[in-house]
Amino acid sequence: MKERKKKQQDLDSLKQKLEQSGDLFVTSFEKLTVAQDFELRKTIRGAGGMYEVVKNTIAGKASEGLPSASVLQGLKGVSAVAYTSGDPVALAKALTAYAKANPTFSFKAGLVEGRAINLAEIQELASMPPKEAIYAKLLYLINAPAQRLVTAMNGVGRNLAVVVDQGVKEDKFSS
């Protein structure tokens, strides 16, 4: 059994991590082997996240007064928290892929940009395209009207040059 001082350190550490990260996923796992746990942690680090097994009471106390309180209060069973201050979509994709490969791993809830999300919304989040693809589409949409305008403006000059060239060839401009 941990000493009260060590429990307080755990609580303070978790509270600090929850304050720093805006996005988190509460998960449940049962009977994961050491190799599976290592693979899970490696997958989460690759997605830019962190993973921590938590005691339900400490998680509830650490989240008091924070947006994460809505998903961490009243947890039951074995719980862990995967959190990130980076891209929540990448973390959701990594966790969803891992959950498909390991049925003993499941989601309990999530928090994205301060808003609690349910299991269906976690699946939707995981099915979104990566951030880079969204940026590429956005830049294309911003650039497309300007590109069309330049093409139209060049077309006017090109058409005028063609008409003048035809007029010169047919000798329409002689006096």
Image (cartoon, rainbow, N blue to C red):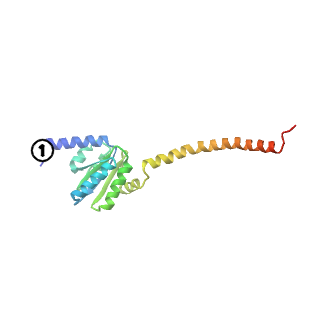
- Residue 37: which quarter of the image? bottom left
Report the side of 65 relative to 10 (left or right).
right
Query: Quadrant where the C terminus lies?
Result: top right
On the question of residue 75 being in view, the answer is no
Q: Residue at x 86, y 38 (%)?
A: 174
Report the side of 153 relative to 82 (left or right).
right
Farthest right residue in view: 175
Name the element at disc 1: loop
On the question of residue 108 being in view, the answer is yes
Sort mark 1 into few (<14), some (14-19) or many (20+) by Cα contacts within 10 Å. Answer: few
Q: Residue at x 32, y 57 (%)?
A: 98
Q: Nearer the viewer, residue 7 or 157?
A: 157
Instruction: Write down the residue under mark 1.
Output: 3
Residue 48 in the image, given as x and y percentages of width and height: 33, 47
Q: Nearer the viewer, residue 109 or 133?
A: 133
Q: Nearer the viewer, residue 22 or 88?
A: 88
Q: Amino acid at mark 1?
A: Glu
Residue 56 in the image, given as x and y percentages of width and height: 22, 51
The mark total stands at 1
Residue 164 in the image, given as x and y percentages of width and height: 77, 41
Report the side of 109 relative to 167 (left or right).
left
Q: Residue at x 72, y 44 (%)?
A: 159
Q: Residue at x 44, y 52 (%)?
A: 129
Farthest front residue in view: 169
